Amino acid sequence: MNLRKGRRLSRDERAYIDVVPIVDILLAVFLFLAILAFQSPMTFIAVKLPFAEHGEKGAISIMKIQVTADGSYRMGGKRLSISEIDKRIKKVKPTSIIIEADERAQHKFVVQLMDIAKKNKVEDLVIATRTRR
């Protein structure tokens, strides 16, 4: 039941929309998106490729292997032995392998991976590092 029928609302009772919280939220979202845009390691340039009569479809497969400080190997967060890694390389036949070795890992563990990659005819072998700022 509407008891206020016919009675005008006073200035304090009128409904209003406060836009300050909306502006604050939008500013925070834009700031977040700007930070993400500048932190992106890859930039893409829009390129429209031409058509060709004869072409070749190629696929690049990359395998990432980590060597921990104690000399164990990991792929995709899973601990593997050197023979299991050899079997995976034979099965997947990657074109590139990225070795992420801990700075305290012994050199012999990295050399074992390099030897397996060479034996399986991997084209590119990359040893990951980080830069000082």
Image (cartoon, rainbow, N blue to C red):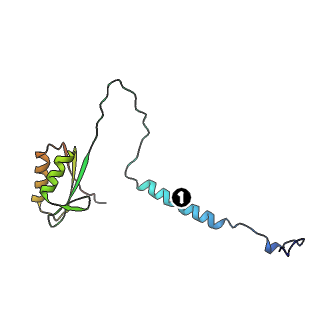
What amino acid is found at the position of numbered circle 1 in the picture? Answer: Phe
- Point out the residue furthest to the right here: 6
Label 1: few (<14), some (14–19) or many (≥20) C-alpha neighbours in 10 Å = few
Q: Up-down: is 80 above or below 89? A: below
What is the number of callouts on the image? Answer: 1
Quarter of the picture containing the N terminus is bottom right
The residue closer to the viewer here, 7 or 96, is 7
Query: How far across and how far down the image is residue 67, in percent?
Result: 18, 60
- At 37% from the left edge and 52% from the top edge, which residue is drawn? 41
Callout 1 secondary element: helix
- At 26% from the left edge and 62% from the top edge, which residue is drawn? 77
Query: How far across and how far down the image is residue 21, in percent?
Result: 62, 67
The residue closer to the viewer here, 73 or 81, is 81
Quarter of the picture containing the C terminus is bottom left
- Point out the residue furthest to the front here: 1
The residue closer to the viewer here, 33 or 123, is 123
* Image side of residue 108 versus residue 33, left or right: left
* Image side of residue 58 versus residue 41, left or right: left
Which residue is the site of mark 1?
A: 30
Q: Up-down: is 32 above or below 12? A: above
Query: How far across and how far down the image is residue 52, in percent?
Result: 36, 25
- At 18% from the left edge and 51% from the top edge, which residue is drawn? 88
* Image side of residue 45 versus residue 1, left or right: left
Q: Quadrant of residue 28?
A: bottom right
Query: How far across and how far down the image is residue 80, in percent?
Result: 18, 60
